[in-house]
Image (cartoon, helix red, strand yellow):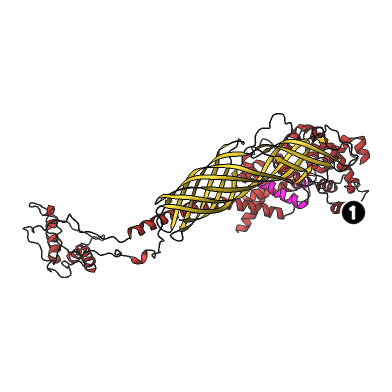
């Protein structure tokens, strides 16, 4: 093989090509099963995703509606003392037309004077008794309702009973002379006297259908609230790296793998109306970002720190590292393990590094919150802005590798990386929608996803977008 | 009866479907056509995956991922070239993505696997035996493996390789020389000292 390679390298390449290109070992059968399973999964996932979205939207709508309507019903159910109406009309004289004594006469009058006939779907005419029954039924229901609630009046079950203690209620317009509608003319003027209303729950026709009454802690209408919040942060869109600074000829290219973090903060809110809060505070947002870098290096671009040393040589390279918070100066120090292997100074090689960046931001939010619902559950909508300052960044190299065997970096020797970063300031917008629960008159909890986007930043050109799932406890004082 | 009908249909599909109709059937999501396509090209694609992967298990994953992409993107195949060439490109790109991911990890040479490989293939055998070559390739650092595969086997130019891998042309050339030297030494048992 060596001889062939030395004498005819092209033939060597051709042999390699022929052997490798036609190499087709039998693929294991299990691979197709996995492919088919993935394809089926993808086909099933797509409609399921839509279903989940629809279910989520409907659930949110239902939740919002329930919270709102429950609060509304409870507000309506608060007992109030009703005053006698100042608009009670005086009792008017009965019309000259003799009023039928009872319901039976009334319905028979209708039947006699009306030309309307009703017909069953089968074509059979309804009997007069059935028609009377149909007309009498609503009136009986009204009577039953009135009797159950202390109103007195003529009972349709007892035709001809005289009205007693009637509150004058009349409809004079329909008793004008010359009115041709005999049916309306003959409507019995029924008058009721209602007992003075007393405080108490309103009657309900279907009590079993209403949700059981839950005691709602009285919420303070105005005042200050102190909150303590915590929650995870996910970065949806990272900041775009900036162009390298002039004078730096070596640049790392950065790929961001994951970026997440946590938020811990206190808040001070003032409830200036029943449903409105204005809130500020201080949040500490720590984020963790895993990135990978690649750089084209040459030894001539670095500085050998120990050129006279016959042993291991150490090189130091100065870079402009493109980060998510603007460019920063980075020093990478790499040791060459094998001192006997020489490498041309202008020979480029590629260095790959995976790094972890830990940063801490301090944020001061200023938001307005609108609360919806009167029950213990409340929807909360938030909007506002925040100013943030990046206080600290720690960069560490997790592992590295290089495509250069002659330089022979030890695989267990991690390059030293030091990053100096400027302070970064940013202005963000905040928008959130969450759910709160009133535990007691003073204590409430709240879970709220908050979307945070950058409006302006002192360093980076990108516009990162983050979601914070804030769980907060508020104490009113 | 229905089984017989299905079998007859499958036989017809297997025997008669040309590339265009097979691609069209795959585009419609017909599982039978997808199976037919897979059966036709699985072996050469598995060989390709083995050349890019570190292990046979990784090669199986690559083959699976490659065919998933083939079925997902088959709508973009217009029939201007051969279907096999198009599938090969898709699987090749899957392999390159794998290499890019692996480049961020430490180059590890599994000495035990290498000894086992050499024990299985004693000196005196054909040094260009494909199985042995593939196993030697799998022992190489991912960057070397990618450049050697693309230049020697896929016959790409250094400019194309540099574009594919995001490296300089000079780097591609130097990587190729080193990769060949690495392979030589590996096949001649000299790389055990690594």
Q: Position of residue A332 (x, y in %)?
A: 76, 40
Q: Position of residue A149 (x, y in %)?
A: 23, 67
User: Seen in the image, is B75 located left or right of residue A434?
Assistant: right
Q: Residues within 10 Å of mark 1 (few under 14, many from 20)?
A: few
Chain letter of the residue beneath label 1 in the structure image: B
Residue drawn at the location 18% of the way across and 55% of the way down: A86
Q: Is residue A444 visible?
A: yes
Q: Is residue B62 within the magenta segment?
A: yes
Q: Is residue B37 visible?
A: no
> Circle 1 is placed at which residue position?
B119
A284 vs A196, nearest the viewer: A284
Return the residue found at the far bottom.
A158
Magenta span: chief secondary structure:
helix
Q: Which residues are magenta?
A: B46-68
A255 vs B33, nearest the viewer: A255
Q: Is residue B103 within the magenta segment?
A: no
Secondary element at image label 1: helix
């Amino acid at each position: 093989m060596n001889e062939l390679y030395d004498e005819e390298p092209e033939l060597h390449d051709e042999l390699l090509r022929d052997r490798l290109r036609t190499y087709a070992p039998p693929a294991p059968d299990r691979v197709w099963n996995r492919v088919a399973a993935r394809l089926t999964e993808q086909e099933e996932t797509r409609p399921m995703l839509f279903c989940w979205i629809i279910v989520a939207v409907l659930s949110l709508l239902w939740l919002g509606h329930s919270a709102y309507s429950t609060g509304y019903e409870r507000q309506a159910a608060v007992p109030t003392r009703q005053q006698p109406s100042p608009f009670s009309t005086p009792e008017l004289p009965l019309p000259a037309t003799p009023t039928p004594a009872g319901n039976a006469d009334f319905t028979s009058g209708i039947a006699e004077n009306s030309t309307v006939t009703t017909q069953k779907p089968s074509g059979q005419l309804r009997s007069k008794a059935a028609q009377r029954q149909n007309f009498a039924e609503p009136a009986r229901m009204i009577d039953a309702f009135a009797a159950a609630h202390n109103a007195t009046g003529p009972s349709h079950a007892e035709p001809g009973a005289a009205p007693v203690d009637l509150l004058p209620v009349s409809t004079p317009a329909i008793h004008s002379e010359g009115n041709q509608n005999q049916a309306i003319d003959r409507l019995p003027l029924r008058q009721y006297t209602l007992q003075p209303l007393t405080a108490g729950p309103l009657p309900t026709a279907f009590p079993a259908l209403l949700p059981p009454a839950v005691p709602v802690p009285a919420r303070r209408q105005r005042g200050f609230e102190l909150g303590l919040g915590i929650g995870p942060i996910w970065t949806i869109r990272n900041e775009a790296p900036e162009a390298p600074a002039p004078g730096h000829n070596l640049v790392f290219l950065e790929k961001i793998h994951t970026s997440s973090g946590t938020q811990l903060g206190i808040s001070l809110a003032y409830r200036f109306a029943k449903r409105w809060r204005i809130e500020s505070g201080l949040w500490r947002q720590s984020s963790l970002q895993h990135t990978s870098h690649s750089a084209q290096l040459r030894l001539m671009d670095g500085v050998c720190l120990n050129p006279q040393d016959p042993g291991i040589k150490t090189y130091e390279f100065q870079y402009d590292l493109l980060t998510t918070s603007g460019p920063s100066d980075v020093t990478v120090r790499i040791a060459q393990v094998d001192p006997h292997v020489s490498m041309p100074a202008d020979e480029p090689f590629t260095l790959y590094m995976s790094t972890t960046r830990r940063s801490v931001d301090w944020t001061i939010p200023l938001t307005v919150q609108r609360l919806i619902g009167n029950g213990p559950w409340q929807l909360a909508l938030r909007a506002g802005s925040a100013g943030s300052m990046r206080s600290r960044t720690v960069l560490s190299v997790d592992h590295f590798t290089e495509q250069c065997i002659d330089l022979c970096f030890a695989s267990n020797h991690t390059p030293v990386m030091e990053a100096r970063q400027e302070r970064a300031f940013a202005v963000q917008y905040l928008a959130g929608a969450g759910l709160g629960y009133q535990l007691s008159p003073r204590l409430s909890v709240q879970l709220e996803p908050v979307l945070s986007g950058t409006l302006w930043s002192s360093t980076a050109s990108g516009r990162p977008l983050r979601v914070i799932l804030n769980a907060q406890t508020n104490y009113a004082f | 009866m229905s089984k017989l009908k299905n079998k007859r249909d499958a036989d017809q599909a297997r025997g008669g479907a040309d590339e265009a109709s097979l691609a069209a059937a795959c585009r419609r999501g017909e599982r039978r056509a997808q199976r037919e396509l897979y059966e036709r090209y699985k072996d050469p694609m598995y060989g390709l995956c083995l050349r890019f992967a570190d292990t046979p298990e990784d090669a199986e994953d690559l083959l699976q991922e490659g065919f998933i992409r083939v079925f997902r993107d088959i709508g973009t195949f217009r029939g201007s070239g051969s279907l096999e060439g198009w599938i090969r490109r898709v699987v090749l790109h899957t392999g390159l993505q794998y290499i890019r991911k692996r480049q961020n990890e430490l180059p590890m040479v599994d000495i035990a696997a290498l000894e086992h490989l050499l024990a299985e293939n004693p000196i005196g055998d054909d040094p260009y035996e494909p199985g042995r070559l593939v196993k030697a390739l799998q022992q190489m650092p991912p960057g070397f493996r990618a450049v050697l595969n693309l230049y020697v086997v896929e016959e790409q130019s250094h400019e194309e390789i540099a574009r594919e891998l995001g490296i300089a042309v000079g780097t591609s050339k130097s990587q190729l020389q080193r990769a060949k030297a690495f392979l030589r030494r590996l096949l001649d048992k000299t790389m055990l000292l690594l």
